[in-house]
């Protein structure tokens, strides 16, 4: 996903810098985020500073979920819907996610804590099943399977990315 042969990687590096990568599978053309910066359904990550890109203000933040809530007065769920991300897409860097996973595993080793966690998980299982059933298709998903509107228009009419966007915005 992150090599020079990937057209999206080349575009992101040319627009945002050499140390920026995309965390989501997608092929060009992709749709720009009209309400701010970046692209719909694409999370950007700075490998040097370990920060995530905020599509609303264009800033790089380590804690994107906290930033979105405090700076833009949005719940994470609303932010993800706005920028076309799946509800389960993490807003933390891959490195932070790994560190949190290790911490959770250590926490889970304590038998008393494990018993409490398992009890709470059992309560939430049915609710989680219901949430999975109602899962909404997002731009992030459509980018992954090459079916976002810009990609479809490009395939159907051999239309350029910018022509497709202009057509969609009419």
Image (spheres, rainbow, N blue to C red):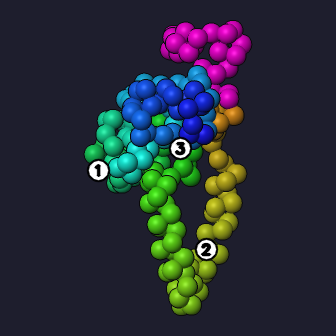
Farthest residue, direction left = 71
Residue located at (69% from left, 34% from top): 145
* In the image, residue 33 above or below residue 19: above
Q: Position of residue 22 (x, y in %)?
A: 51, 39
Q: Quadrant of the N terminus?
A: top right
Q: CA distance from mark 3 to mark 2?
A: 28 Å
Q: Is residue 73 above or below residue 122?
A: above
What predominant SS class does the magenta segment belong to? helix
Binning the other alpha carbons within 10 Å of mark 3 as few (below 14), some (14 to 19) or many (20 upward) gives some
Residue at x 39%, y 32% (from the top left corner): 16
Q: Which residue is mark 3?
A: 23
Q: Residue 70: give its label.
A: 1
Graded by Cα atoms within 10 Å as few (under 14), some (14 to 19) or many (20 or more), the crowding at tag 1 reads few
Q: Could you say which is closer to the camera, residue 94 or residue 71?
A: 94
Q: Residues within 10 Å of mark 2 (few under 14, many from 20)?
A: few
Q: How many marks?
A: 3
Ranked by sequence position, the earlier of labels 1 and 3 is 3
Find disc 2 in the rendering and name its residue: 121
Task: Please indicate whether residue 147 sits to the left or right of residue 116 in the image.
Answer: right
- Under circle 1, the secondary element is helix
Which structural element holds mark 3? loop
Give the magenta-colored segment's residue range. Answer: 146-170
- Left or right side of 49 for 25: right
């Amino acid at each position: 996903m992150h090599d020079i042969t990937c057209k999206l990687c080349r575009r992101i590096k040319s627009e945002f810098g050499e140390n920026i990568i995309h965390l989501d599978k997608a092929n060009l053309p992709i749709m720009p985020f009209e309400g701010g910066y970046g692209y719909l359904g694409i999370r950007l990550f700075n490998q040097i500073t370990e920060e995530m890109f905020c599509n609303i203000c264009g800033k790089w933040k380590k804690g994107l979920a906290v930033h979105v809530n405090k700076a833009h007065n949005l719940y994470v769920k609303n932010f993800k819907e706005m920028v076309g991300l799946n509800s389960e897409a993490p807003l933390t860097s891959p490195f932070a996610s790994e560190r949190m996973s290790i911490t959770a595993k250590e926490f889970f080793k304590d038998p008393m804590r494990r018993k409490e966690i398992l009890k709470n998980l059992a309560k939430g299982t049915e609710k989680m099943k219901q949430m999975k059933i109602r899962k909404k298709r997002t731009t992030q998903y459509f980018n992954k399977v090459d079916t976002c509107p810009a990609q479809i228009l490009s395939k159907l009419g051999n239309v350029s990315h910018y022509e497709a966007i202009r057509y969609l915005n009419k």
